[in-house]
Image (cartoon, grey):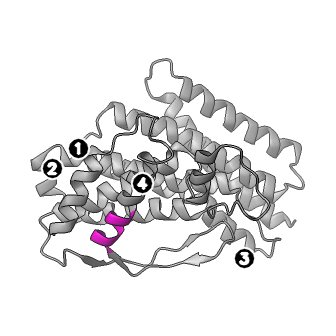
């Protein structure tokens, strides 16, 4: 690895340290998320000191990404606790989305520096897109609770919903459904059905519900543009294999129906006895049928 690449990685750590200093200086109560983020940043610092003259990009990338996830989680929780203050929350949300996008930007920069191709683990990739989508879901949900804020934020809310839906759809595409006939054994029939449908955790199920609900919110917005299809700027995302996925249009009704139908199928199928509610999902599906 070149000295130029070393400098690139160390610069990233410096930016995180500057951000952390501002967070440390702010008044706060005892917080386990703060302590966890602080410990993760220290691990990253230690790794950089130990390999100061020859940092290993792949290991750095994993530690760097986990540090970002822990720091932003602490910041997100504060935003939620403060109920997304009207005067400052949009800038903060955009700032967090930007930081959560940094690992993928770094991957591209490493390629530009002619380093060996470096990728994130599927779990970290899923987490990055989940966190971005869930953050926008929570923010949009808060805005929708206040009619005055909806009126003032209509166009912005429109874009945030589109971005959030795309982040969640991408998260659900990171891993491919497991084909159990291909040498994979599973003693639990319900688990087998979940894996074959690409449902690897509760988070995957929540992502379906959130994406479907955000499609519903978008169709309920008083926007003067097309209700069923909306052109959006190209957003490059990556599957587990690193394939580029691009989408220029988003059919909110079709996407919403697909997400909610799958959510209901899983909740009333393999997870029937697990307490997942489908009432709201069914109400939104009824709306999609009439819009």
Q: Residue at x 54, y 29 (%)?
A: 33
The CA distance from mark 3 to mark 1 is 40 Å
Mark 3 is surrounded, within 10 Å at the Cα level, by few (under 14), some (14 to 19) or many (20 or more) other residues, namely few
**Which quarter of the figure has residue 180?**
bottom right
Q: Residue at x 68, y 55 (%)?
A: 11
Mark 2 is surrounded, within 10 Å at the Cα level, by few (under 14), some (14 to 19) or many (20 or more) other residues, namely some
Residue on which disc 1 sits:
86
Q: Which one is earlier in the sequence, the residue at label 2 or at label 1?
A: 1
Q: Which residues are magenta?
A: 251-258
User: Which of pointers 2 and 3 indicates the residue nearer the eye?
Assistant: 2
The CA distance from mark 2 to mark 3 is 42 Å
Q: Nearer the viewer, residue 202 or 264?
A: 264
Q: Which one is earlier in the sequence, the residue at label 4 or at label 3?
A: 3
Can I make out residue 264 in this image?
yes
Q: Please tell me the numbered disc located at residue 206.
A: none
Mark 4 is surrounded, within 10 Å at the Cα level, by few (under 14), some (14 to 19) or many (20 or more) other residues, namely some
Residue 151 x %, y %? 11, 56
* Element class at badge 3: helix
Asked if the stretch drawn in magenta spans residue 256, the answer is yes
Circles 2 and 4: CB atoms closer than 8 Å: no
Q: Nearer the viewer, residue 97 or 140?
A: 140
Residue on which disc 4 sits:
265
Where 179 sits versus 123, above or below? below
Residue 94 x %, y %? 40, 55
Residue on which disc 2 sits:
149
Circles 2 and 1: CB atoms closer than 8 Å: yes
Q: Which one is earlier in the sequence, the residue at label 2 or at label 3?
A: 3
* Element class at badge 4: helix
* Element class at badge 1: loop
The CA distance from mark 2 to mark 4 is 35 Å
Q: Residue at x 22, y 65 (%)?
A: 288
The CA distance from mark 4 to mark 3 is 44 Å
């Amino acid at each position: 690895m070149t000295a130029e690449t070393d400098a690139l990685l160390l610069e990233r750590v410096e930016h995180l340290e500057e951000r952390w200093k501002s967070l440390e200086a702010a008044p706060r109560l005892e917080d386990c998320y703060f302590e966890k983020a602080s410990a993760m940043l220290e691990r990253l610092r230690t790794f950089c000191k130990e390999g100061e003259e020859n940092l290993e990009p792949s290991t750095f990338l994993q530690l760097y990404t986990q540090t970002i996830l822990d720091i932003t989680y602490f910041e997100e929780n504060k935003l939620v606790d403060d109920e997304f203050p009207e005067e400052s929350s949009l800038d903060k949300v955009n700032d967090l989305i930007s930081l959560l996008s940094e690992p993928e930007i770094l991957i591209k920069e490493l390629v530009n520096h002619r380093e060996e191709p470096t990728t994130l683990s599927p779990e970290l990739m899923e987490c990055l897109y989940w966190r971005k989508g869930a953050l926008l879901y929570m923010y949009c949900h808060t805005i929708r609770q206040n009619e005055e804020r909806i009126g003032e934020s209509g166009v912005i809310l429109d874009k945030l919903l589109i971005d959030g839906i795309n982040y969640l759809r991408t998260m659900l595409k990171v891993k491919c459904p497991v084909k159990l006939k291909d040498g994979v054994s599973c003693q639990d029939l319900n688990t087998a059905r979940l894996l074959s449908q690409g449902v690897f955790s509760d988070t995957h199920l929540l992502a379906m519900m959130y994406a479907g609900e955000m499609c519903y919110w978008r169709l309920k917005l008083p926007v003067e543009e097309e209700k069923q299809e909306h052109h959006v700027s190209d957003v490059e995302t990556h599957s587990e294999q690193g394939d580029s996925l691009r989408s220029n249009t988003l059919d909110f009704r079709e996407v919403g129906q697909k997400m909610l139908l799958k959510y209901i199928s899983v909740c009333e199928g393999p997870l029937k006895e697990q307490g997942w509610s489908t009432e709201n999902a069914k109400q939104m599906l009824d709306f999609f049928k009439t819009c």
